[in-house]
Amino acid sequence: MTRHVAAVLAVVLLVAACSSGGSRAKPPSPSPATSATGATGDRNAYVDAIYDGLVAETPTVPKDEMRCVARAIVDGVTVARFHDADVTVAEVRSPQFEPPAQIANAMSTAERVGLATHLQTCGIGRIVGVSVAGSFGDLVGSERARVGQCFSHGFVGPSARRMIAGMMLGDLSIPDATQLARITIECVGLAPLIENASGLKLSPAEQQCVDRVGQTDASFLQLLSDQFRSVQSAGQSARTRLGVQVFVCLTPAHRAAAAKRS
């Protein structure tokens, strides 16, 4: 679950690799000794473990905000559900941990909304935004702060709560994954995302063109949405995955390089 708090959006860094197939890696099964100890953990043990994982993933975020997120997760999911799903303290400490479907399936709509509401009070939007900005070397200083603020706006209010809960629990619906992808593109910019997806360093002219045509070409938006749901993209060529209009923005040399990565 620590992976879903802030690093879920790091999937944008894996788009190129994942678009040709594959699935998320699952953490190794804990040893019997670990399971026996972890399964008896109380609220504080789970909070501390999730907090440790969050801090390891996003060391630049204030510790009190991370403690707030950890408490929100444990109180929202409940220790009883962690135990029922055989989720140990050691497992939730791992950055690779993803909550089993049993947890999401056991939570009512009201409980999911409660989880998301608590996370909003922790500033989950800004936390995610700052973490995402940290994945892009060019987004520093005021630009990093801008991205964090942009995500904050996207994660605010009742309309974002279903998306937040789905992101945390690993079961985003199609509309919510699309909403998350749209926020990501609006806040980070399409050109930086295309650079990560293609492995290319775009020229200023290419960047301007990509950002301009991206306002109408939703191909990459769909690709991101699929990746957030761990759904393999139907498009296998670079032209299809990036979007025809976006692909045309690239220089001939960059088109050839992007095609080789498909």
Image (spheres, grey):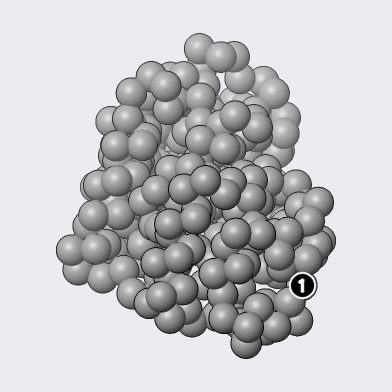
Regarding residue 93, the answer to whether it shows in the image is no
Q: Is residue 201 above or below residue 72?
A: below
Position of 57 compared to 259: left or right?
A: left
Q: Residue furthest left?
A: 142
Residue, x 64% and y 30% (percent of image)? 173
The amino acid at mark 1 is Ser
Q: Position of residue 234 (x, y in %)?
A: 81, 51
Residue, x 75% and y 47% (percent of image)? 231
Question: Based on the displayed image, in which of its 4 quarters is residue 252 positioned?
Answer: bottom right
Residue, x 70% and y 38% (percent of image)? 100
Identify which residue, 63 or 232, lies in the foreground. Answer: 232
Residue, x 37% and y 35% (percent of image)? 155
Judge the density around disc 1: few (<14), some (14-19), many (≥20) Cα neighbours within 10 Å. Answer: some
Question: Based on the displayed image, in which of its 4 quarters is residue 212 positioned?
Answer: bottom left
Counting the numbered discs, the total is 1
Identify which residue, 46 or 150, lies in the foreground. Answer: 150
Question: Based on the displayed image, in which of its 4 quarters is residue 261 positioned?
Answer: bottom right
Identify which residue, 253 or 123, lies in the foreground. Answer: 253
Q: Is residue 81 above or below residue 225?
A: above
Name the image quarter holding the C terminus.
bottom right
Identify which residue, 221 or 14, lies in the foreground. Answer: 221
Q: Is residue 105 above or below residue 236?
A: above
Q: Position of residue 204 (x, y in %)?
A: 38, 77
Regarding residue 113, the answer to whether it shows in the image is yes
**Residue at disc 1, secondary structure:** loop
Q: Position of residue 75 (x, y in %)?
A: 44, 27
Position of 164 compared to 20: left or right?
A: left
Position of 246 compared to 132: left or right?
A: right
Q: Which residue is label 1 attached to? A: 262
Q: Position of residue 152 (x, y in %)?
A: 30, 41
